[in-house]
Image (cartoon, grey):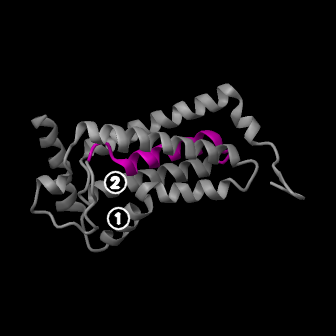
Amino acid sequence: MQNIYFIDFLILDFIQSFLKSFVLDPVMQMLSYIGEAGAIWLLAAFIMLFFRKSRPCAVMLLTSLVLALLIGELGLKNIICRPRPFMVNRDIVLNIKDPTGYSFPSGHSSCAFASAYVIARTLKSKAAGIGAYILACLIAFSRLYNYVHFPTDVLGGIILGTLCAMATVFVFRKTGLDKKLEREIRIGKKRF
């Protein structure tokens, strides 16, 4: 465990020493805030629900987010109980509000990568998939930059989110639920 902490702090201290700047601070704050509780991904799913072709993606995205949050936030964090880096290294002054809860795995990273995987695998747009992965990487990096997660927390979140998304897409495709969601929905005289 000591070796993991040593490597984690080596990476975090490198970011603080060589990458942290007044120019990047507000950008990294914003990336952390839009990733809070999967907010940006929830917004994307809500918008996609209104379009027949993207509805399966939206429902799979929501399902994988719930799965990742249940396993990560309610399960693993409370089992592992790992403190956050700024709690261990008290010399750091955070540029965001002190997050509560435990550190492993990163909820921001698990939500981001669960969403990116679903978007990349289910939407026909290659650009949307690439954009989702770029945003997911930036949100995950912001957690390191802001000194609120260890690199292994972020890596754990990436793995958890990806596995949750893979399981979700597999189940939806295997059961044909993705095809059922593409059908038109009639509410009164309106079709969606």
Residue under pointer 2: 141
Residue 107: horizontal and vertical position, in percent? 37, 48
Q: Residue at x 36, y 45 (%)?
A: 73
- Say which amino acid is labelled 1: Met
* Number of the label disc, if any, that sits on residue 28: 1
Q: Nearer the viewer, residue 81 or 43?
A: 81
Which badge, 1 or 2, comes first in the chain's sequence? 1
CA distance separating discs 1 and 2: 8 Å
Q: Residue at x 70, y 36 (%)?
A: 178
Q: Quadrant of the N terminus?
A: top left
Residue 86: horizontal and vertical position, in percent? 17, 57
Tell me whether the residue at label 1 lies in contact with that at label 2, contact meaning CB atoms closer than 8 angstroms. Answer: yes
- Say which amino acid is labelled 2: Phe
Numbered marks: total: 2
Residue 155: horizontal and vertical position, in percent? 33, 40
In the image, residue 10 lies in the stretch drawn in magenta? no
Q: Is residue 157 left or right of residue 1?
A: right
Residue 176: horizontal and vertical position, in percent? 71, 29
| Above or below: residue 126 compared with residue 188 | above
Q: Which residues are magenta?
A: 103-125
Q: Main secondary structure of the magenta part?
A: helix
Residue 156, picture quadrant: top left
Say few, some or many: other residues with alpha carbon within 10 Å of mark 1 (under 14 / 14 to 19 / 20 or more).
many
Q: Residue at x 32, y 69 (%)?
A: 24
Which residue sits furthest right?
A: 189
Q: Nearer the viewer, residue 49 or 81?
A: 81
Q: Is residue 49 left or right of residue 104?
A: right
| Above or below: residue 143 compared with residue 94 | above
Name the secondary structure under disc 1: helix
